[in-house]
Image (cartoon, coloured by chain):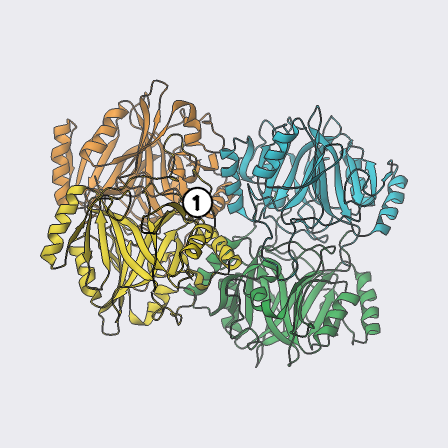
Chain colours: A green, B cyan, C orange, D yellow
Amino acid sequence: MAITGVLRAAMMQLRVLDLETSVDFYTNVVGLFEVGRTSDGRVLLKGYDEFDHHSFVLRKAETAGMDFMGFKVASDAYLDFLAGRTKEFGLPVEIVPANADQPGVGRRVSTRVPTGHRLDFFADIEESDPKPSILNPEIWSVEPRGIGSATFDHALLFGPGSAETVRYLMEVCGFAAVEKGLLPDGNTFVTWLSCANRAHDVAVLEFDQPGKLHHVAYKLDNWNDIGHAADIMTMNEVTIDAGPMRHGATRRQMIYFFDPSGNRLETCTSGYAFYPDMPVRVWDFDHIGKGIFYYTRQLNDNFLKVVS
Amino acid sequence: MAITGVLRAAMMQLRVLDLETSVDFYTNVVGLFEVGRTSDGRVLLKGYDEFDHHSFVLRKAETAGMDFMGFKVASDAYLDFLAGRTKEFGLPVEIVPANADQPGVGRRVSTRVPTGHRLDFFADIEESDPKPSILNPEIWSVEPRGIGSATFDHALLFGPGSAETVRYLMEVCGFAAVEKGLLPDGNTFVTWLSCANRAHDVAVLEFDQPGKLHHVAYKLDNWNDIGHAADIMTMNEVTIDAGPMRHGATRRQMIYFFDPSGNRLETCTSGYAFYPDMPVRVWDFDHIGKGIFYYTRQLNDNFLKVVS
Amino acid sequence: MAITGVLRAAMMQLRVLDLETSVDFYTNVVGLFEVGRTSDGRVLLKGYDEFDHHSFVLRKAETAGMDFMGFKVASDAYLDFLAGRTKEFGLPVEIVPANADQPGVGRRVSTRVPTGHRLDFFADIEESDPKPSILNPEIWSVEPRGIGSATFDHALLFGPGSAETVRYLMEVCGFAAVEKGLLPDGNTFVTWLSCANRAHDVAVLEFDQPGKLHHVAYKLDNWNDIGHAADIMTMNEVTIDAGPMRHGATRRQMIYFFDPSGNRLETCTSGYAFYPDMPVRVWDFDHIGKGIFYYTRQLNDNFLKVVS
Amino acid sequence: MAITGVLRAAMMQLRVLDLETSVDFYTNVVGLFEVGRTSDGRVLLKGYDEFDHHSFVLRKAETAGMDFMGFKVASDAYLDFLAGRTKEFGLPVEIVPANADQPGVGRRVSTRVPTGHRLDFFADIEESDPKPSILNPEIWSVEPRGIGSATFDHALLFGPGSAETVRYLMEVCGFAAVEKGLLPDGNTFVTWLSCANRAHDVAVLEFDQPGKLHHVAYKLDNWNDIGHAADIMTMNEVTIDAGPMRHGATRRQMIYFFDPSGNRLETCTSGYAFYPDMPVRVWDFDHIGKGIFYYTRQLNDNFLKVVS
């Protein structure tokens, strides 16, 4: 198999302040589908174009933010390999049994990276409805709703020690650096990383507080869907942070917006397909604004300040 | 690296009847860029969004059709591995030295698969202009022209013994079956295969004549570009075979059209990203028309008859 | 007021073979909204972006086809003027009282043009829901559904004596010829006519049977919606006659498709805005195929044969 | 003819600080075509989809801003009517002879409205290349370039006494009010006005300085073109003021951007077609931000401050 090891960013467990308000928002606006709830009250959601049992989990809490980000790997054997290499790298490893707290998900190798984020890796996950048909499939099995989020795409993580987190993802987990943004001294402060062909599965930005989530993104089909999403957001009084816009980095077209708890979300589309033989694209400090917000060519007030 | 082995379909050498007419067509209509010519008069071309030296070669000949299809692999070491495994599989292997007939391309492992097509694999290829910038990159370095073909995408190969060719691609080269179409008896007669995240890099269809090319495809960004492409084709009196349309299989939006020599081309966009943990999608015999031409739901007269 | 006289094509009463099948089709696929039924069982429908009470009427009958096409005029006084001028032109005039058979519609001046079609003109029509909001309006009051037909757009009428029908529309009703298609002898056999800025409100084509409907069209916003419409049609097993395509004449992007009774419909978008100071655009006989079907550049088998 | 009187907003003469920089900007970025220069050094430009000789004039001056806005009317006789009615309304009338300062343009009735803007009306204007073909026309005669501006669309004028300017446009010139925005006291402070089917040809906003131009707009085909335009603007280092965005009022999708002299331009598309029997849509003071910038739902800093 040409894609081995880590296949893709595949899951996010997010903390929200009010569960039912959030479920309404994530199903009717973001367009995810609820596929179940856990005994402790968490809500499992997915995009309409995903086979995986769920890719998004809402947990009621006192503060917004992320609990963990999950990655699907190619095989159970790779989990053992990953656990060993993670320990060698000097990071903690916890093995979470199958179905422990994530219904339908096999055993997980869980670690906490230097930036303070918990990352979980799993090889097995059941399917759930809705999902694409596999016999004479129509283009969807259930009509997209809201902004029509199709598939989990990526997240941008903020925290201290980002160079070490990036090194872990590249050396241990096999991610490739796709693009990076530089400080005036030439050091890297943000890296976009891909484990396969996505323009990125995860990005990491140097920040003084650990474990922070800048945004989590689901994918749409094209720029027209981005425009439609902006209309839907306005009609639902969703706060748009930036966009419709293009990122310079990854060339994705996108909107940043906030959920009712203040977690930043992104809906994105287009951009290029990454291959590991591509050179790393670099944004120097004077152009990083353009790398993030291609049309305004400068960061907005929120970009480096508002995280959850 | 998560993507190993064969990275992507990356090259096609095509026979055309008139060279300058073809160069005009491929540059001004298809929108490829000429990057050089060989001493024996072949013309090297590429899409504007490719780093690789070239992805398309035109050779003047008495008949249309393909000379070979090329694949980029992850490493030179993999070429040795592939050469060995190909021989074990029982197929011929030729080692083509670097720069022998493809300027800028490293040594190639070349074989001929049971369906009669020559497939070449290479690990090294130089870069050439135009290509994406890597320092504070704009969305393109050179303005797209014609229909704006961005990157080489895939080809559909017709020939006898397709099951063996598919088995070779899967067992030796690490391709995954993405979708397949069945005969009334349940046997497979067409298989879409991916080596990474593309919906397919190559497809193989059972046919009574060996080595035939059904079509070769370059990628655009979205459905709007497909409509623009149809306009450009009409204004240039290009014969459109089918589309603007959607394929049921891979969900790609597309146009089939012919070059001046009768080779069928495709311009395509959208569709889903494949991952190797996805189930194979199947089109039974009664629905194969819909699998190919989603809107008409039946094959057109040309589909199984016109090849080059 | 700069637009006077006839404002726009605004209504079509269509005969269908099975009423409930048709209502399901027109509401769930075409995306019209049912706003009421008449005492004799006809069903009143409208697009989501129309203020007018209804723009489409379904009547159960033994044969498909159109009963009449309606036009909204600027004032009641203009109806009197039109009635007089129509008689002077030599056509019959019937005054249909308000609310006689069209709930919510004021008195109509009704005539039958030489091509055999009944045309009705009215100045007054009530509003009905859904309709656009007028206080701090969102982009729609009710979410579009199916293919999302927004507003009644135009119809193409087939019949003998088309030159006289065109002359009536131009000399009496103030329509302007926008484009026309010629026979080999240079005579006109199809004329596209506009009463304001639409690329056309009605077109008339010379045909040997009177009173025939070639198609009736509703409008979408853009080419992406046309692609979405084709997807929806396939998933609902609607027969597509042609498209997604562009018309050469009027430059509209479109799909021709059939309702369950065999009436041809069109969904269209884009094209240019017409002004009465524009020259008439002409398609000579050798290019009329391109004028109709810009991408295939030839009429399909159905174009001159299948009418209702 | 159903459209009489004033047909459309058709011309803008703009002051720019540097002529050649401006010509480069308007041709290569905005995508207008230069059709000639006057003996006093002004530059005549047009969109690729216009028959009219020119729709845009650049005049080198010490300050940015507009000299006059022009409207095409249906007939020379209407000019006399308009001149008389304008005098009766109490506004000055100047008759500018044909070809006096605008090559290819017939005699003009020129006035200055209470908001301080000079408005010119003309019935005759020659054609110039590029323009649409009229015999078997392709979709364009010359390939669009830059952002691909197709046709002059509208302008937003700022000045004191806006109620009187609106009254003049409606009572004398036959414009219809399409939408309006209210002050807290319920008085109107901005009115969008149409002379035919455009969502608006001109808008007028109450402002303390006379004769100010807020923006002048050319039209594109669809939202995808808006995204493309934003890309082109970034690559040409054009300052984007707002967008890609939707206006609530008129539902147009758009970008505000600045020319090198500080004149604000708009590129717009979509929205609804206006008819004079439509009710006026109203934005109350609390929602005017949404009426202008539908996605941010608030005016940006520049909206009421930056004019030329």
Give the labeled residue for mark 1: C29
Residue in the foreground of this view, choosing between C194 and C22:
C194
Residue type beneath disc 1: Val
Q: Residue furthest top?
A: C185
C73 vs A84, left or right, is: left
Residue in the foreground of this view, choosing between D126 and B259:
D126
Report in which chain the residue with disc 1 lies. Answer: C
Residue in the foreground of this view, choosing between C217 and D137:
D137
The part of the image, by quadrant, that contains residue A10 is bottom right
C164 vs A169, left or right, is: left
Secondary element at image label 1: helix
Identify the residue at image location x=41%, y=37%.
Answer: C259
Q: Position of residue D32 (x, y in %)?
A: 41, 48
Residue C4 vs B91, above or below: the answer is below
Q: Position of residue B176 (x, y in %)?
A: 74, 47
Q: Position of residue B21 (x, y in %)?
A: 61, 30
The part of the image, by quadrant, that contains residue C191 is top left
Identify the residue at image location x=41%, y=46%.
Answer: D33
Residue C193 vs A223, above or below: the answer is above
Callout 1: 10 Å neighbours few (<14), some, many (20+)?
many
Residue B286 visible in the shown view: no
A143 vs C140, left or right, is: right
Q: Position of residue C7 (x, y in %)?
A: 24, 44
